[in-house]
Amino acid sequence: MTRILVVDDEESIRELVKFNLEKAGYVVDSLENGQEALNLILANSPDLLVLDLMLPGLDGLEICRRLRQQEQTKFLPVIMLTARGEEIDRVVGLELGADDYLTKPFSPRELVARVKSLLRRSQTAPKAASDTTSPAIIRGGLKIYPDRFEAFLNGELLELTPKEFQLLSQLATNPGKVYTREFLLEKIWGYEFVGDTRTVDVHIRHLRQKLEKDPSQPELIETIRGIGYRFKG
């Protein structure tokens, strides 16, 4: 059974999320304390984490940051909840490694849809690199092995999150083709995104930091103003 951990200091939110996810067939644990949640995750990682931004003791941003630093949890799917309306809070959460976010108040139906999509499309760990003859996507010094969930730049292994890897693979498969942000959201995240498309922009920025010599002057991933992105390599 798929196990989900919900961490929120509001009992009403925990119960709402727990009820709807259990109704959808998941096993759900819930906690209100950030440090307790981090200890539990590191000891016995769930399949997905629903994490509130504002928590007593250890907040959601710090939890997310620490999880991404640990080998056993670096690919754990994370949906972040926030009651704040400012875009900066959502962006910071994505920059620290959250895969998705929902702003309170949210629709339980939408939450379940996001959870299903993330579980379906996210991988908690790269596949074992046992087949060294697998075909690669080669673009100059960049080599991508889709079946192994690995990418190398000039022989160096890139430390990519699942979403970053999927974005890079999608863009590099068809160099020169322009992809809209809406297409990438639906293709990579698996749903029609309601609201802005900042999620894609943040992940592209992360990719550039790992790929480009000068992320402010990208040579591989080009922004097409008002439309989206394309791979130039």
Image (cartoon, helix red, strand yellow):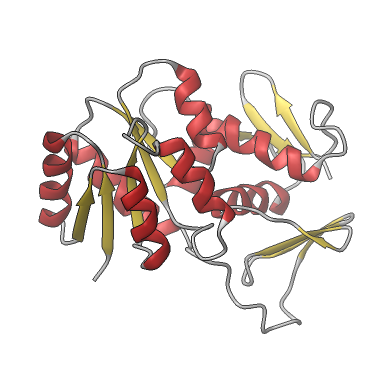
- Give the total number of marks visible in the rendering: 0
Q: Residue furthest top?
A: 86
Q: Residue furthest front?
A: 57
Q: Residue at x 69, y 55 (%)?
A: 159
* Position above or below: 87 against 22: above
Quadrant of image for the C terminus: top right
Q: Residue at x 62, y 54 (%)?
A: 165
Q: Position of residue 16 (x, y in %)?
A: 12, 40
Q: Quadrant of residue 108?
A: top left
Q: Position of residue 226 (x, y in %)?
A: 62, 18
Q: Which residue is nearer to you in this view: 148 or 161?
A: 161
| Residue 99 in sight from this viewpoint | no
Question: Horizontally, is 38 left or right of 216 in the view?
Answer: left
| Residue 226 in sight from this viewpoint | yes
Question: Horizontally, is 108 left or right of 71 in the view?
Answer: left
Q: Residue at x 34, y 30 (%)?
A: 54
Q: Quadrant of residue 148?
A: bottom right
* Position above or below: 162 against 130: above
Question: Horizontally, is 70 left or right of 157 in the view?
Answer: left
* Position above or below: 6 against 180: below
Question: Horizontally, is 100 left or right of 14 in the view?
Answer: right
Q: Position of residue 32 (x, y in %)?
A: 23, 43
Quadrant of image for the N terminus: bottom left
Q: Which residue is nearer to you in this view: 171 or 178?
A: 171
Q: Position of residue 9 (x, y in %)?
A: 23, 36
